[in-house]
Image (tube, grey):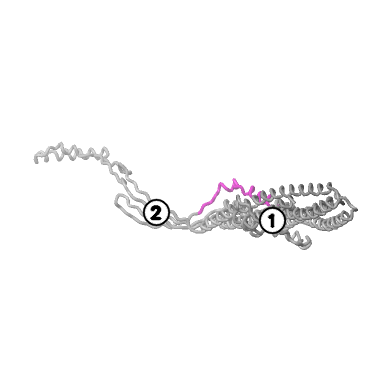
Amino acid sequence: MKFRLILSAALLISTVKVIAQPSYTLEQCIAMALENNIKIRTARIDIVDAQEQEREARAKYLPSISASASYFHAVDDLVQHKVGLDDEQKQTLNAQIQELAPRLVELGIDPAILTSIPTEYTLGFLQHGLMANITALQPIYTGGRISAGNKLARLQSEVKQLMLQQNEDQVKQTTQLYYNQLLSLYEKVKIIDAASQQLASIHRDAENAYNAGVGYKNDVLRVELKQSELTNSRIKLENGITLSQLLLAQYIGLDGTSIQIDPTLPDSLSAPETLRINHQTALDSRIESQLLDKNIEAQQLKTKMKKGELLPSVAIGAMAYAHNISNAGRVNLVGLATVSIPISNWWSNRGVKRQQLAWQRACQERDDNRQLMLLQMQSAYNDCESAYKQLTLASKSIEQAQENLRLNRNYYQAGMSTMSDLLDAQTQLRQAQNTHTDAMIAYLNARTAYLLATGR
């Protein structure tokens, strides 16, 4: 009686908890995990970053425009030039001064004033000024580097999208693993509760038989001991449920919250044959295979860019400039055409050979990994098939254990069997049910792994 009260109280508390907490389905848990997982958020940022790089690469098609302006003011003139008389000119000047001296005396002027006339002068200019220009250059030919660079930027955006999808698949799979783990614990609690009800009925029969004088006290004690074992097992399961709830909640972004899920296992599961597809065809659906193809394409574009560094570059443009130097302003327009030939790159090779080797390595890695993926698909299908067979055997074991329990109970009531045999039969049924639960969860996980391995 005391045990039944404790069991009823535990069931009541569990029921109150279930009512108080919202119940999440697998689809809801996956949606929350995709929204809150740090890898997914980082992958989305990487996509935005790749899109920005793509915009930067497109800008290479446009003219490059630059403008500059400068003003200077020097202490002295920047350009200075001395102008003076040579020796012959000086002799001629002295002769002329001597001829003019008497006339200056007659006029009352001191002839010495003529000797102070300087024979050297310093001319200077460019002490301050303002200069400004604007230049536009449009690339005409760059050896295909701009085109290859834009394709490479678009390819990186596609790669980031695939990596986001890959992370989403991994998050979905991990969420299902945590969800199924919690589902398994809930199912095992149901099994224990059902076993407890069976033991309660057996306990009543044993107690009634003992009170009527046709049974043994030892049988009653055996049943009560088994009931205590079930109570301990249920406590352990409840602790496991609490930890699994916290683990699932943390993974889907509800850190510190104990969540409740729908504890119902599926009634039936389709056979692996309904899921099987052609593995060779499924290779193209694998994100890993697509990433390997993108890597080869990227190496090809990088090789093209390296080869472009060996080719001439041609650009045309114009430059407008204005200057105001020493208060003399002027504006002009100049057409430009440039041809750049990287002569030294021809013998240095600029890493073209190494880039070609990188492309060859990428091709070999793709072929090798595609073979490994085929093996992975087959292995995942074998695991799925094996798990389904074990599930089928577990279902049959339950039927056999139920029939065994029914017979042993009838035998015990007829006095043809002992309480130990009856309790063993009840334990075997519970073990068979637990095995069936484990087999079903294993098949669910194996099915998810196979779908993921085949790109679904």
What amino acid is at disc 2?
Asn
Secondary structure at numbered mark 2: strand
Give the mark, 2 or 1, whose residue is nearer the N terminus. 2
Q: Nearer the viewer, residue 421 or 219?
A: 219
Q: Position of residue 17 (x, y in %)?
A: 64, 55
* First to last magenta residue range: 339-363
Compared across the picture, whether 385 is left or right of 152 comes to: right
Would you say residue 345 sits in the magenta stretch?
yes
Question: Foreground mark, 2 or 1?
Answer: 1
Q: Nearer the viewer, residue 154 or 420?
A: 420
Residue drawn at the location 85% of the way across and 48% of the way down? 216
Main SS, magenta residues: helix
Seen in the picture, residue 448 relative to 232 is either above or below; the reply is: below
What amino acid is at disc 1?
Ser
Task: Give the quadrant of residue 44.
Answer: bottom right
Q: Residues within 10 Å of mark 2 (few under 14, many from 20)?
A: some
Residue drawn at the location 60% of the way across and 49% of the way down? 256
Task: Give the quadrant of residue 151.
Answer: bottom right
Circle 2 sits on which residue? 133
Circle 1 sits on which residue? 289
Whether residue 436 is visible, yes or no, is no
Q: Position of residue 249 (x, y in %)?
A: 63, 52
Whether residue 265 is visible, yes or no, is yes
Alpha carbons under labels 2 and 1: distance apart: 53 Å
Q: Residues within 10 Å of mark 1 (few under 14, many from 20)?
A: some
Residue lying at the far right in this picture: please name it: 416
Q: Position of residue 142 (x, y in %)?
A: 54, 55
Would you say residue 417 sits in the magenta stretch?
no
Q: Nearer the viewer, residue 224 or 36?
A: 224
Compared across the picture, whether 54 is left or right of 185 comes to: left
Q: Nearer the viewer, residue 456 or 221?
A: 221
